[in-house]
Image (cartoon, coloured by chain):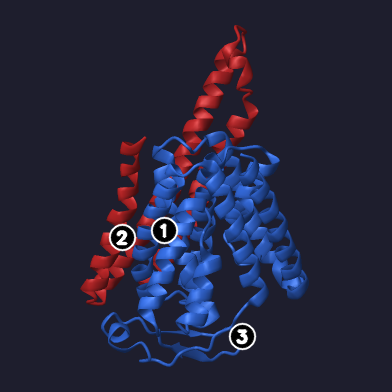
Chain colours: A red, B blue
Amino acid sequence: MTMERIMAGFMRYGAFASIGLTAGGSLLLLMSDPHPIFSVSERACPNLCMSSTGAILTLLGLMMLILVSIGRLLLCSVLFLSQDETHMARISMATVLLVLASALFRLLS
Amino acid sequence: MMGVGGGIILVPVLTSLLSVPIRVAIGASMFAVVATSSAASAVYVREKLTNLSLGVLFSGLTVLGALLGVLAGITSPSAVIYLVFSFVLLCAAWLMFRRHKGRASPVGSGGFLEQSLRLSGAFEDAATGEIVEYGVRRIPLGALGMVLAGLISGMLGIGGGIFQVPVMDAVMGIPIKAATATSNFMMGITAATGAIAYLVMGYVHPEIAGPVVVGVFLGSGLGARVMPHVRDSRLRCLFIGMLVILAVVMARKGVSS
């Protein structure tokens, strides 16, 4: 199996898994009516559980999408290293660091 | 269906029809672009249409542009974002109307940079069965175009393919199929940069981003199936008209806010 096929499989199935997780979480979020959460009723607890589980699953799915994107760059570095293109592998790793640097925007908020 | 990531339609629709705050809409759109890019790139990489060397090299530049774009997006007033978005929509409509098709440049036309970074590529054209070999010319100019595309992508939450593909095709002489595939590969990485930034800043709301991502992902799959059965010229006219209408809507929102 070539490296391109491994990368294609990783992106394809990674995207499907992430979308599956996001869809499941979104469904839970849509099924739970968030408005009665703050009212004192019997439905408050189940709704809260359902909506928070939904939110967590959705966020996990979304974060998995980011990992799939970063993963393709890591696979690219492996591919370039296997072809003795070390400079391209370095560029690929530097790009990963740049992508991760966007998390530093937290410091601005 | 039209070869654009979806963000260019998604953000105006979310803000205009559903009254979603623009930064929340941008956050959701970034994830939608990542999702569609991953699925489409898988096909292009497997078929060896993507120029991985060029994709990785230019991803670094679009990511750099996206970081600047996110910074501009979160520090600018909403009115400015609406007006810039309106301008970008008009540019996209013009680019789609013009649809310049460049000629593939021969291998070696990019000189030292092309040879040292091994940027030239080749793919088998499924329509003709021929092996298409191409070089990459005007690399510094193309690199500047990629930084600008990344900046727009990071600021507005769009994929940036609408600008990347014409730059690669008309300026750098990369055949349109390879340009589209390579742009798709880069789009997901660029959008992931913005997505992380918007996520950590709290602009990604699961109840909005989740359904949007799933909807856009399913819609893009459906679009790819429908596309071969629809006349290209009619579809293009419809899309250009929609872009112009959305540009007017966004400009009005920008002026009124």
The residue wearing badge 2 is A95
Q: Position of residue B147 (x, y in %)?
A: 40, 65
Identify the subunit bearing mark 2: A
Q: Are marks 1 and 2 in contact (CB under 8 Å)?
A: yes
Look at the image and tell me whether residue B44 can be seen.
no
What whole-number distance in Å separates the C-alpha atoms at marks 1 and 2? 9 Å
Identify the subunit bearing mark 1: B
The residue wearing badge 3 is B127
Q: Nearer the viewer, mark 3 or mark 2?
A: 2
Callout 2 secondary element: helix
Identify the subunit bearing mark 3: B
Q: Residue furthest front?
A: B255
Query: Which of B232 and B218 lies nearest the eye of the viewer?
Result: B232
Q: Position of residue B188 (x, y in %)?
A: 46, 58
Question: Would you call the spot at circle 3 few (<14 residues within 10 Å), some (14-19), or many (20 or more)?
Answer: few
The residue wearing badge 1 is B189
